[in-house]
Amino acid sequence: MIDHADDFDILATGIPALVSLAPTREGRVSVGRVFDGDRLRVRTLNIPAGVTLAEHVSGVPVLIHVASGRVTMDIGGHAHELGQGALVRAAGDVVHEVHAIEDAQLVLTFHPEE
């Protein structure tokens, strides 16, 4: 965290700082914790080229932002090639899988419904 007050937090000053929270591990997905709040969680994922994050559900609604790289996301039975800047919303019960076409960094925002 870069700056903090009772009513705000500056968590990162740019994409490079944000994705650096999940150190790259050879041939494996790595996860970095950015923020945990009462109604919101933010994580970063580094996925090396050729690696697949196996089919799963998030359990709560999630926004998936491709911060860099390219991935194929199989969601709802359909494959989508997504590049830097892509933003996907998925309900918590939607089965999805992510395969990195090239080294990719994702920012995930989990927002449980009330």
Image: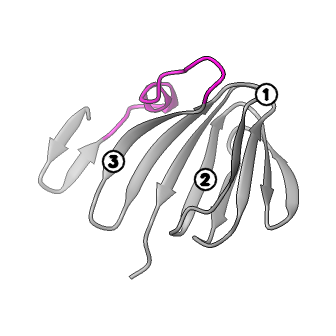
Residue 92 in the image, given as x and y percentages of width and height: 57, 70
Please tell me whether the stretch drawn in magenta is mainly helix, strand or loop.
loop
Point out the image quarter for the N terminus: top left
Task: Residue 69: say if magenta.
Answer: no
Q: Alpha-carbon distance for marks 2 and 1?
A: 19 Å
Mark 2 lies on a secondary structure that is strand
Task: Residue 20: say if magenta.
Answer: yes
Mark 3 lies on a secondary structure that is strand
Nearer to me, 94 or 54: 54
Q: Alpha-carbon distance for marks 3 and 2?
A: 15 Å
Disc number lying in front (2 or 1): 1
Q: Residue at x 37, y 41 (%)?
A: 34
Viewed as shown, does residue 48 lie left or right of 41? Answer: right
> How many residues crowd around disc 2 within 10 Å: few (fewer than 14), some, or many (20 or more)?
some
Look at mark 2 in the image and give the residue it sits on: 64
Point out the image quarter for the C terminus: bottom left
Look at mark 1 in the image and give the residue it sits on: 50
Residue 85 in the image, given as x and y percentages of width and height: 68, 43
Q: Residue at x 45, y 45 (%)?
A: 43
Viewed as shown, does residue 77 lie left or right of 12? Answer: right
Look at mark 3 in the image and give the residue it sits on: 35
Q: Which residues are magenta?
A: 11-28
Residue 38 in the image, given as x and y percentages of width and height: 27, 65
Q: Is residue 2 above or below residue 37?
A: above
Sequence order check: which comes first, mark 3 or mark 2? Answer: 3
Quarter where residue 2 is shown: top left
Dot 3 and dot 1 residues touching (CB under 8 Å): no
Q: Alpha-carbon distance for marks 3 and 1?
A: 28 Å
Disc number lying in front (3 or 1): 1
